[in-house]
Amino acid sequence: MTAPGEVTGLLLAWGQGDAGALERLIPLVHAELRRIAQRCMAGERPGHSLQATALVNEAYVRLVDAQHVNWQNRAHFLAMSARLMRRVLVDMARSKLYQKRGGGALKVTFTDALAVAVEPGLDLVALDDALEALQKFDERKHQVVELRFFGGLSVEETASVLKLSSETVMRDWKLAKAWLLRELRGPSPDA
């Protein structure tokens, strides 16, 4: 078991330019990165060209390029890793859509263990577009969704990263999910 302080120390060293710190960090957090990748891949179609291990590797390549980040702690690192993994999947989906000129978007399921399941089969590009719209509308709620859904952080971990109360995180989480569902469903036929 790795001491939380060891991970934070390596993150701080890496953020200050110690390239070797990343090499020592990755083995310590690999299992958590793989869990995040599996969570990101859970809704992908069978036979997807990218597997969880490859997603971790692609995120690692992008992390290496992220120099001089002001890492706060382990949760912040995992949240940023989840964001990078989501970007990899969205970039692939957009590329496939571009190649097919609009057809066959990758499907994901927007669910959470603590909340009711939402409509299965939402496409990744539409979800990403809705998340970008949420970010413009309310940055904090966007961060809560990113940390909770993609990063797999608990309410308490999310509250710690964002320096909020757990109650505020839960309120933002519920409101953000409702907002995203409305965005993904489009305008109501009654409107």
Image (cartoon, rainbow, N blue to C red):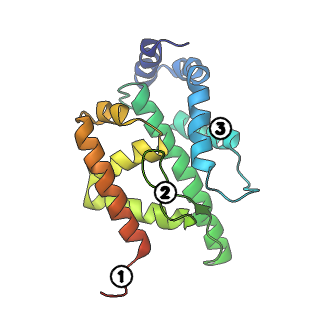
Q: Amino acid at mark 2?
A: Ala
Mark toward the start of the polypeptide (1 vs 2): 2
Q: Mark 1 or 2, which is nearer the eye?
A: 2
Q: Amino acid at mark 3?
A: Asn
Q: Quadrant of the C terminus?
A: bottom left
User: Spatial distance from mark 3 to mark 2, Cα to Cα?
Assistant: 29 Å
Q: Nearer the viewer, residue 64 or 164?
A: 164
Q: Is residue 62 above or below residue 181?
A: above
Q: Mark 3 or 2, which is nearer the eye?
A: 2
Q: Which mark is residue 57?
A: 3
Q: Nearer the viewer, residue 35 or 19?
A: 35
Give the image location of residue 160, x and y in percent: 30, 30
Q: Secondary structure at mark 3?
A: helix
Give the image location of residue 129, x and y in percent: 43, 65
Is residue 50 among what the camera can see? yes
In the visual, does 160 lie left or right of 4? left
Give the image location of residue 26, x and y in percent: 58, 24
In the visual, does 148 lie left or right of 19? left
Q: Secondary structure at mark 2?
A: loop
Disc 3 to disc 2: CB gap under 8 Å = no
Read off the residue under disc 2: 117
Q: Secondary structure at mark 1?
A: loop
Total marks shown come to 3
Q: Nearer the viewer, residue 24 or 75?
A: 75
Read off the residue under disc 1: 188
Q: Amino acid at mark 1?
A: Ser
Neighbour tally class for label 3: few under 14, some 14-19, many 20 plus, Cα within 10 Å: some
- The answer to which quarter of the image holds residue 181 is bottom left
The residue sitting at the bottom extreme is 190
Q: Residue at horizontal 40%, vertical 59%?
A: 131
Neighbour tally class for label 2: few under 14, some 14-19, many 20 plus, Cα within 10 Å: few
